[in-house]
Amino acid sequence: MTAVDAQPAGDAWERRRVRMSLRIERAGLELLRERGLDHVTVDQIAARAGISTRTFFRYFRNPRDVLTAVPARESRRMCAALLARPASESLLDGFHAWFRTLGTAREPAGPTEQLELETMTLWSAIVRDSPDVVQAESRATSALAAELETVLWHRLRFGSEDAEKVGVLAAAFAAVIWWVYAHDLEQGAGTDLSTRLDSAFDLLSRLQMVTEAAPG
């Protein structure tokens, strides 16, 4: 991490950097929705964002990298919230608490939050149109699983010898969240994502109980 990267999040320079990244992201997602992943270039994104290609490469490596930004950001946000939950609370209860916050509309408090909302709306529209493509190309579930591994190490107190268990659980949680999210978008307006995620994780709890009760 460079000294610049380590500056406080509230620093004016950092806020400008974040907003520039979101502007590029929004321009890229607009083009990806209009033209499809295979028909969007860095030059096109830079032109739409009103920047040079050199500036683009300060923030992203390629158009696919733009597609990864939303799931990576939301994964970090969710996992930070899970790590901040009370130590006495079970991990599944922590998930439920986070999911319930999704039922509350996120009002943009400023230009950065407004850009985040716009990019999320665009990304969701692309997922709704091409969920399999987005899952593969954005590495959405991989990004979420990577963040969840940190949560599992800390919340479930796994040891260094439990890397495989952590990886399997993180992948399973990420797959469930993605499946519910993608299918919620397919259902269209009127569905309640937070309730569906709650129900899905209740099923995971029941699966554990069924497994424990099954004859050896």
Image (cartoon, rainbow, N blue to C red):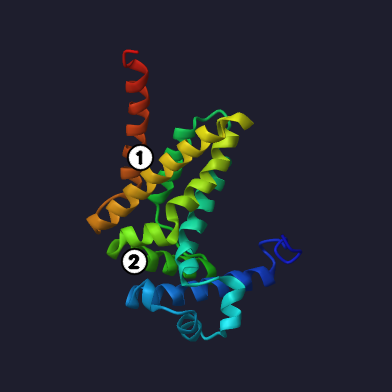
Q: What element carries label 1?
A: helix
Asked whether residue 110 appears in the rendered view, the answer is no
- Residue positioned most to the top: 215
Q: Is mark 2 on a helix, strand or loop?
A: helix
The structure residue drawn at horizontal position 55% and vertical position 84%, both measured from the top left corner, is: 51
Asked whether residue 205 appears in the rendered view, the answer is yes
Q: On the picture, is 214 further left or further right than 14?
A: left
- Reading the image, the residue beneath label 2 is 126
The N terminus: image quadrant: bottom right
Which image quadrant for residue 85?
top right
- Count neighbours of disc 1 (C-alpha within 10 A) and say few if under 14, some if 14 to 19, many if 20 or more: some
Q: In this view, does 33 lie above or below 105?
A: below
Q: Which amino acid does label 2 sit on?
A: Ile
The structure residue drawn at horizontal position 66% and vertical position 62%, both measured from the top left corner, is: 9
The structure residue drawn at horizontal position 23% and vertical position 55%, both measured from the top left corner, is: 187
- Count neighbours of disc 2 (C-alpha within 10 A) and say few if under 14, some if 14 to 19, many if 20 or more: many
Q: In this view, does 162 lie above or below 213?
A: below
The structure residue drawn at horizontal position 50% and vertical position 48%, both measured from the top left corner, is: 78
Q: Which of 12 and 132 is in front in this view?
A: 132
